[in-house]
Image (spheres, grey):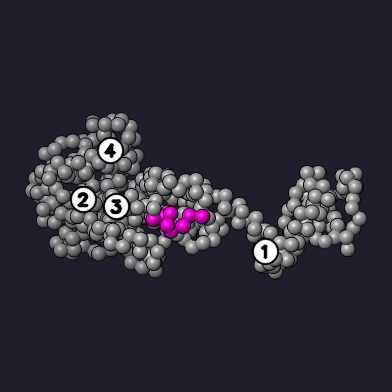
Amino acid sequence: MRKPAPSVSQIQAAPPGRIYYGDNLVLIIRGNGTRTWTYRYTSPVTHRVTETSIGEFPAFSYAGARKVASQLHLTIAQGQDPVHLKRQERASQITWAEACDAWVAVGQASWSDAQKRNVHLRLNVHGKALATKSVAQIDAALMEVTIKPLMKAFPKQARQTHAVWARVFAYALHKQWRHEPNPAVWKDNMAFAFHGESKLPSKNFAAMNYQEVSAFINRLRQMRCASAACLECVILCASRTSEIRCMAWQEIDWTNKLLTIPAHRMKTRVEHVIPLSDRVLALLQQQKQYSTSDQYVFTGRNAGRPLDEKAIRKVLRHMGERVTVHGFRTSFRTWAAEQTNFDFYAVEMCLSHAVGSAVTRAYLRGNAIEKRREIMTAWAVYCGSAA
């Protein structure tokens, strides 16, 4: 039953609580003195009783609130939920740039510096044309137009960029900022737009035959520069480039001959301990007189910064080799399999690989340091046998 229209003084004098004026119009008075008009209704979508805000008094008078309530009544009679409509309206105002920022804020805590740079490139540079577009309105046609120039020039980068975009749209769907399907999905979607144009090269890294590594190391030692020393350490430790290139002095345990790489610098995000052979220790000792940083072992032209990855690749090009730095991990693994009888698990742990199933790893919790020390020493001796 509708109550008589209240006066302004009656509304102002009302104590904290809820006043029902009939026809689903409610005035909510809070302890801080704010008075808010709301409309209470049963949602035609969820079939649950809910409320939606109309506005605060005195910005909305009783008559103004009653008028809005009548409009909401008509909306509900048409089978639409006012709350859902408000959410859709807010979602339509979320731009691609805002969606990207929100997704980055959620995930960046677990990313490495390199991952952050790559994400910035793919979202803010390659996706610049999308920045001001509503994330709810972007469709597959716009995706195709935006990515096409990059796909023609650098198909591998384009595919990687597209994969990042797809994650942003998945996050937008999760946040209900869009309700249409993910327009950046590749399979049965964008794959049709770029059929035959975007085949990625093999993911296998070009590797040197392990039988040639010793002669290569012998030539490498003639170069006598930080880049060459770093590359030799990478090979002898069977590590990824960044794990050695960004090595800090404090990570080295000279007494126990160990290098402890913290989890945030590992691809697996798990701390990795490497037993250091005598040759690696000698190279690290040598770097003490060449390093220009109190923090990093291997430094380049930029004082206080770790050696740039390009400097290491440049060594390989200078030597006329077409292999990749990462490929030396394959050389090590093949040598261990074909030329030694070392324990399989210990060899895999040298590469910081996850060994076995989840159940196996739950029981296999040691780090097999002494077994791995024997392996790394044997590898170092093999690599230096031609010197």
- Comes first in the chain, label 1 or label 3: 1
Mark 4 — residue? 307
Residue 189 percent coordinates (x, y): 40, 64
Q: Is residue 282 above or below residue 177?
A: above
- Name the residue type under label 4: Leu
- Comes first in the chain, label 2 or label 4: 4
Count residues near mark 1 (Cα–Cα under 10 Å), then give few for <14, some for 14-19, many for 20+: some
Please tell me in which quadrant of the rendered image residue 49 appears: bottom right
Q: How many angstroms separate mark 1 from mark 2 (CA)? A: 60 Å
Residue 295 percent coordinates (x, y): 34, 35
On residue 80, which mark appears?
1
Q: How many angstroms separate mark 2 from mark 4 (CA)? A: 17 Å
Mark 2 vs mark 3: give the one in front.
3
Mark 1 vs mark 2: give the one in front.
1
Count residues near mark 2 (Cα–Cα under 10 Å), then give few for <14, some for 14-19, many for 20+: some
The range drawn in magenta is: 137-144
Q: What element carries label 2?
A: loop
